[in-house]
Image: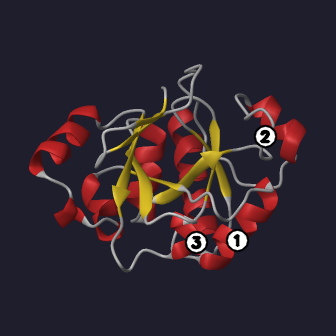
Amino acid sequence: MYTKIFFSSVRKCVKELKKGGIIIYPTESVFGFGCDPDNQTAVINLIIIKKRSIKKGFILVAENYNRIKSYIADNEISSIQRDYMFSCWPGPVTFIVPTSPKTPSWLTGQFNSLAVRITDHPSVKKLCKHFGKPIISTSANISNQNPCRTFNDIKKQFGQTFPILFGKTYGRERPSEIRNIITGDLIRQG
């Protein structure tokens, strides 16, 4: 039964992503909003829903590095830096990386870098695999409000407006750690 419900939710979410919609899905700590990172209209709609500044930029999440490689200036990352990233992935560590010239500004905001994470969440891995590309990862909440940690929280804040990927969060208290791969700076403690 669980498998049937899960794959039904994957199909529904992929369909929504492909038509430029927004979904909600479980992450390592909270529920997140997701959309197609290459669809400017979807990203702008997400910014409006969250009441978030376009200057902030977003995190891309994928099931493997090859999915996000086209957004990254991979040649600017040393083999030591890449090995370090790979030692933390898959997992709840997000890295700030230099961007490819093709990376849209609606993903980077005011920065010339991009935040990326290779997830170890099995539901999100399957979603990205079926979608065939990374998705935006940002907490499901209005900016500066508490993120949704349960289905009840989602219902309270957003009703049944968005398709939800069936699954549970890992319940981590803190959001993903964020590190700048070039400078080594810790941006957010995980």
Which residue is label 3 attached to? 106
Q: For the residue carrying disc 2, how many other residues have a C-alpha within 10 Å: few (<14), some (14-19), or many (20+)? A: few
Q: For the residue carrying disc 1, how many other residues have a C-alpha within 10 Å: few (<14), some (14-19), or many (20+)? A: some
Furthest residue to the left? Answer: 79
Report the side of 103 relative to 88 (left or right): right
Up-down relation of residue 58 to residue 123 (above or below): below
Quadrant housing the N terminus = top right
Q: Amino acid at mark 1?
A: Ile
The mark lying in front, picked from 1 and 3, is 3
Q: Is residue 165 visible?
A: yes
Say which residue appears at 54% left-offset and 37% top-offset.
27
Report the side of 164 relative to 145 (left or right): left
Up-down relation of residue 98 to residue 102 (above or below): above
Q: Nearer the viewer, residue 83 or 4?
A: 83
Q: Amino acid at mark 3?
A: Trp
Find residue 44 and name its label.
1
SS at mark 2? Answer: loop
Q: Position of residue 187 (x, y in %)?
A: 47, 37
